[in-house]
Image: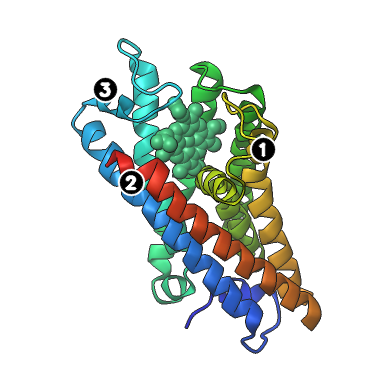
Amino acid sequence: MATIDASIATARPARRADWLGQSATFCYLAIAAGQLLFIAFILLFYYPPTLTGNFAAWNDKPLIIGFVAGDSAGNLFFAAHVLMAAVITFGGLVQLLPAIRNRWPALHRWNGRLYMLCALALALGGLWMTWGRGTWLALGGAIGITLDALLIIGFAVMTFGAARARRFADHRRWAIRLFAVASAVWFMRVGYMAWGLATGGAGIGEAMDGPFDLFLAFANSLLPLAVAEIYLRVGARGTAAARNRVAALLTFSGLVILAGSAGAWMVMWGPYI
Ligand code: HEM
């Protein structure tokens, strides 16, 4: 089976398939399962009312600021945001598949351009919703998501620049980093649910202002980024023992993602569709 490990194959010498490759594939499949549930929620809950102009239906689910009568700019930004959310999430999963890249390079290029466009628009639009529209509950959360937006913009520029310069090993490394931070808002939801299942919600505040909220506000982008970085480095030149440790980390991450995604579907997404 094509592994996600193969997606950085040009960044390191060829190696035999080992536990690291298999655990990376497992982790990718867990991410794909969780992100497909998120996409299903967006398509079923947000797409019908947004495409038919029934914006008020957004508020059938708890939001900080969803539809506000008379706020045309804010409502349009929100509409564009949720429409692009499904496109970027699906596009990222497709983009990481080595089989698609190898067999249909034109699809990879066009999907990549669309992905970058959505990444920039979601980050800039999200920044406006946060600071312009004032959509935040706790300052730590607002600063954390701002850091994520800046990382998305920075990594998108690096990914695109490396592709244009035909530095493909660099391009793949930046693309994996971009995928990690562009998945942060999904990871935050999965992280809340996994933590809730494990601890019953310790450290989560009434207004998302508890110690765990503050931790996850930054960890939602920095934790996946750290795991991606460790995987890239050890995959490229790690010893056998280091590769086994990273394989264990990826297997554990995949299991946490599966549990958190199932929880997110049962609590955050499924009940509203
Ligand atoms: C790049 C990937 C992103 C995706 C896939 C995404 C997805 C979503 C979705 C699905 C919603 C609807 C709320 C829900 O039902 O949970 C939403 C709302 C929102 N997003 Fe994003 N988003 C992304 C990036 C960002 C960024 C970088 C920021 C901030 C800088 C941001 C700020 C917001 C805000 C302020 C809301 C409104 C939340 C509310 O009113 O409760 N988003 N996003």
Residue 234, position as x, y percentages in the image: 75, 71
Residue 75, quarter of picture: top left
Upstream in sequence: badge 1 or badge 3: 3
The residue carrying mark 3 is 56
Residue type, mark 2 in image = Gly
What residue is disc 1 on?
212
- The image quarter containing residue 78 is top left
Q: Position of residue 147 (x, y in %)?
A: 66, 35
Horizontal side of residue 50 vs 224, given as left or right: left
The residue sitting at 51% across, 53% down in the picture is: 260
Query: At which x and y percent is residue 228?
Result: 66, 60
Mark 3 or 2, closer to the camera? 2
**Residue most toward the front?**
200
Looking at the rendered structure, the secondary structure element under dot 2 is: helix
Q: Residue furthest top?
A: 70
Real-space Cα separation, disc 1 to disc 3, in angstroms: 32 Å
Quarter of the picture containing the C terminus is top left
Gap in Å between the C-alphas at discs 3 and 2? 19 Å
The amino acid type of the residue labelled 3 equals: Ala
- Which tag, 2 or 1, sits closer to the chain's start? 1
Which residue is labeled 2 in the image? 270
